[in-house]
Amino acid sequence: MTVEVRPATVFDDVAAVIGPKRPNASVCFCLSHRIPAKENQALSGPARGEYVRRLCAEDPAPGVLAYDGDEPVGWAGVAPRSATQFDRSTRIPHIDDLPVWSVWCVRVRPGHRRAGMTGALIEGAVAFAREHGAPAVEAYPVDNGDARVDLTMAFVGLRRWFEAAGFTKAADTTSTLDGFPRVLMRRDLRTGS
């Protein structure tokens, strides 16, 4: 398998990976951490897709996609923290004034898991942020140790995934997901890493 990670500019490919299964759904498309809660709750059905279609046409794109040949098989949501709900979070701290980027969602389609896709997506998200001038990239994964995490909750990532990609724990948070604490992980890009 040859994996290539590219900016998420093709809406149909984004929809194939993170689009809802039902066209009238009011979830997914990776919007819950990108837009205010009221706006997220109000967007349902085709309106969610149209919102993401517009994001795919913007610069920067709303994230990155992993491809196996021409097939989109994975997604990582990545954007400046200032353009996400993490910027206003009272549970996930700001540790300094750097204009960091955030990776908040990593998803690999069934049938393509356990093939190194997660690492490729994280590295692709970091490269994308670096290309757009990010001095550092943050993630807010669960710190689950060896405990199993429900796949529907693993979208925020696991601490060990980010450690394997060169991130280090920068702070604790007061956020939890599926009973696990979330930690703030950071990778500094100013040193060339």
Image (tube, helix red, strand yellow):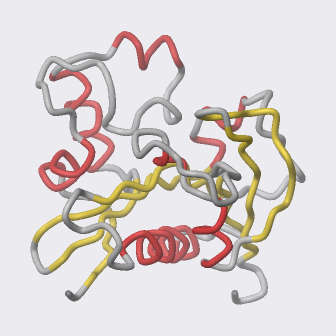
Q: Is residue 13 above or below residue 71?
A: above
Q: Quadrant of residue 157?
A: bottom right
Nearest to the observer: residue 118 or residue 35:
118
Q: Quadrant of residue 165?
A: bottom right
Q: Is residue 42 above or below residue 98?
A: above
User: Can residue 49 be seen in the rendering of this structure?
Assistant: yes
The number of discs equals 0
Spot occupied by residue 89 in the image (x, y as percentages of width and height): 73, 30
User: Can residue 59 be seen in the rendering of this structure?
Assistant: no
Report the side of 190 relative to 17 (left or right).
right
Spot occupied by residue 118 in the image (x, y as percentages of width and height): 43, 69
Spot occupied by residue 107 in the image (x, y as percentages of width and height): 37, 54
Report the side of 73 relative to 115 (left or right).
left
Please, which residue is most extreme toward the front here?
147
Report the side of 52 relative to 159 (left or right).
left
Residue found 46% across the figure and 42% down from its top: 150
Q: Quadrant of residue 158?
A: bottom right
Name the quadrant of the C terminus.
bottom right
Nearest to the observer: residue 9 or residue 70:
70
Residue found 45% across the figure and 52% down from its top: 77
